[in-house]
Amino acid sequence: MPKARTIAFLLATATSLAAHNNSALAATQPCRSMEYERNAYTICEIDLREHTIRIYWKRSDGTPYAHLSALPRALEGEAGRLLFATNAGMFDPALKPVGLYVEKGRELVRVNTRSGFGNFHMKPNGVFYISGDRAAVAETRAFLKQRPQTDLATQSGPMLVINGRLHPRFDRRSTSLKTRDGVGVRADGKVVFAISQGEVSFDAFARLFRDNLNCSNALFLAGGSASSLYAPSFNRHSNIVSLGPMLAVFERNRAASRQ
């Protein structure tokens, strides 16, 4: 009997440890799959107290990273491992960002307020930015009026949700369906990325952010073949076409942050 009880105790302990480890692993993975209005999405919710967001475009030698799989897998001293990455907005044939691009506090591409064709110029467009420990999405004119000091910023378009309202040009009856990815910020400060797993309209994508993800402001980042995701937990490792700016989310190194 003592031997049987010992074996039972060891099995119970092993099961408990496995459950704890699985729970801890799940807690570090910010992405999940969900369905909303019959459309499937990958949703990644980021708490800046637990995660670090970085933006990338060029390597130190001046060549674009171009592929999500080429990004660093970890940031020594600053953050832990790479959890996921996605497109950060529009770019030209040379992979240069079409609009504002700020990396590590340095403005490398200026704000673009010109008129033109395509999604970027479907005004209002907007800016996703991080300033200190705060993230925000703002319509471009509002961003220029505020002129916040930014550590990271990317301009894209169109805005999906503007102060709780959908972009005025979106049509619920639209038949223009594409894979899409975007970013929003909730009232609690969490950054929410969404990547559609199938083709959706702008209106459906915007309603996802406003009505399900509770983002009063959200920005479209990319669509079609440029809609990309690197997320090992979902077995997604790269992109189909070369990309310009990219956003990457790392597990925060708690030991380093306490120093």
Image: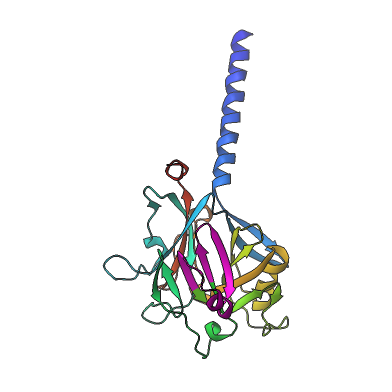
Farthest top residue in view: 1
Question: How many numbered marks have been drawn onto this rendered protein structure?
Answer: 0
Residue 53 in the image, given as x and y percentages of width and height: 48, 58
Residue 130 in the image, given as x and y percentages of width and height: 51, 63
Query: What residue sits 58% from the left and 45% below the top?
Result: 27
Residue 136 in the image, given as x and y percentages of width and height: 57, 66
Asked if 256 appears above or below 183 in the picture, the reply is above
Residues 137 and 44: in front is 137
Query: What residue sits 37% from the left and 62% below the top?
Result: 70
Does residue 196 show up? Answer: no
147 within the magenta span: yes
Tell me which corner region of the image, top left, top right, bottom left or bottom right, holds residue 174.
bottom right
Asked if 54 appears above or below 74 in the picture, the reply is below
Q: Which image quadrant: the C terminus? A: top left
Q: Which image quadrant: the N terminus? A: top right
Tell me which corner region of the image, top left, top right, bottom left or bottom right, holds residue 238.
bottom left
Magenta extent:
128-154
Tell me which corner region of the image, top left, top right, bottom left or bottom right, holds residue 123.
bottom right
Residue 227 in the image, given as x and y percentages of width and height: 52, 71
Farthest left residue in view: 61
Describe residue 210's horizontal placement relative to residue 19 as left or right. Answer: right
Residues 93 and 217: in front is 217
199 within the magenta span: no
Query: What residue sits 60% from the left and 82% below the top?
Result: 124
Describe residue 117's horizontal placement relative to residue 58 as left or right. Answer: right
Does residue 114 show up? Answer: yes
Query: What residue sits 42% from the left and 44% below the top?
Result: 256
Asked if 216 appears above or below 133 in the picture, the reply is below
Give the color scheme: rainbow, by chain, secondary structure or one colour. Answer: rainbow
Describe residue 178's horizontal placement relative to residue 104 as left or right. Answer: right
